[in-house]
Image (tube, rainbow, N blue to C red):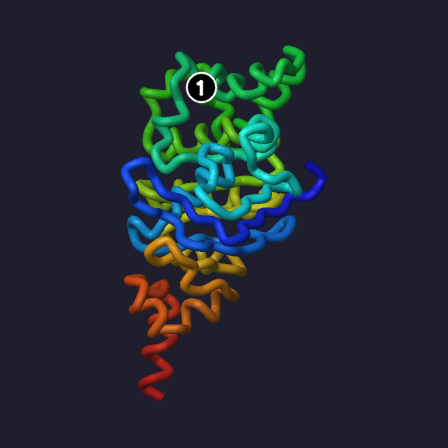
Amino acid sequence: MSHHYLHFERVSYRYPNGYEALHDVTFHITHGEKTALVGMNGAGKSTLLLHLAGLLLPTSGEAIVGGIRLTPRTLATIRRAVGLVFQNPDNQLFMPTVEEDVAFGPANMQLTPEEIERRVTEALAAVGALHLRRQAPYHLSGGQKRSVAIATVLAMEPSVLLLDEPTSNLDPRARRQTIDLLRGFDHTMLLATHDMEMVLDLCPRTIVLHDGRIAADDATAVIFRDSALLDACGLEAPCSVRSIRKEESIE
């Protein structure tokens, strides 16, 4: 995959029970962009991420990841190049030790033992979890599990990083460490979150999903200053933005 971009062209998706989670969604994310995906629960954020990770196929429309159209034949190629960090880290940690969890993906790529070791060490070091490599995942704290889950994806050396609520249930220190880690990721990144302060801190661009449709796609600062849009979509601007608004209204 030579181009680390993401493209949806009029994508819709209907679950087997008949629920249409995405409606005519179109957007384009270029190489290296850090973009936030926000919306109320049920807006379609996770469904959209699952498409980009090659875990769902559109009911209609076209999804392109890194220049490759998402089809049953291209799923394996896309899954090797896209890393998805699930909302619940327990969904990604299933091996006896942290080290084995992080090595699982590279091992399935049929890499040499030396290359697997390099990737495991570098990924754990990147998330500050090298000291946890011999521990059992179920003994870890929530923040440690989140860090290791991200390491399992980094070890695959993905071109595109997708994250579903990466800071949920983290204490302030672990949250800050996670944001600092994501800031250092050089390739394309799309994160779905309710953490609006993180969006303001990390993502220059924000896409707003509402009832499975794109309600807005603009610079994050512009989105957070649009009170009518946020109210209509059941969202709130970060506290820092609300404080500025309050000061401006007083003046």
Residue drawn at (45%, 60%), measured in percent from left and top? 200
Q: Nearer the viewer, residue 231 or 70?
A: 70
x and y, in percent, of residue 51 in the image: 47, 40
Q: Quadrant of the N terminus?
A: top right
Residue drawn at (61%, 18%), measured in percent from left and top? 109
Q: How many marks?
A: 1
x and y, in percent, of residue 189 in the image: 55, 46
Q: Residue 49 occupies which quadrant of the picture?
A: top left
**Residue identified by numbered label 1:** 98
For label 1, the SS is: helix
Q: Residue 250 occupies which quadrant of the picture?
A: bottom left
Q: Is residue 154 visible?
A: no
For residue 191, side relative to residue 67 (left or right): left
Q: Is residue 126 above or below residue 41?
A: above
Q: Farthest residue in the bottom direction? A: 251
Q: Nearer the viewer, residue 78 or 134?
A: 78
Q: Quick one: label 1, few (<14), some, or many (20+) residues within 10 Å?
A: many
x and y, in percent, of residue 152 in the image: 50, 26
Q: Is residue 54 visible?
A: yes
Q: Nearer the viewer, residue 216 or 8?
A: 8
Residue drawn at (57%, 49%), measured in percent from left and top? 7
Q: Which amino acid lies under the numbered mark 1 shown in the image of this protein? A: Val
Residue drawn at (37%, 35%), measured in percent from left and top? 143
For residue 111, side relative to residue 55 (left or right): right
Q: Quadrant of the C terminus?
A: bottom left
x and y, in percent, of residue 187 in the image: 62, 44
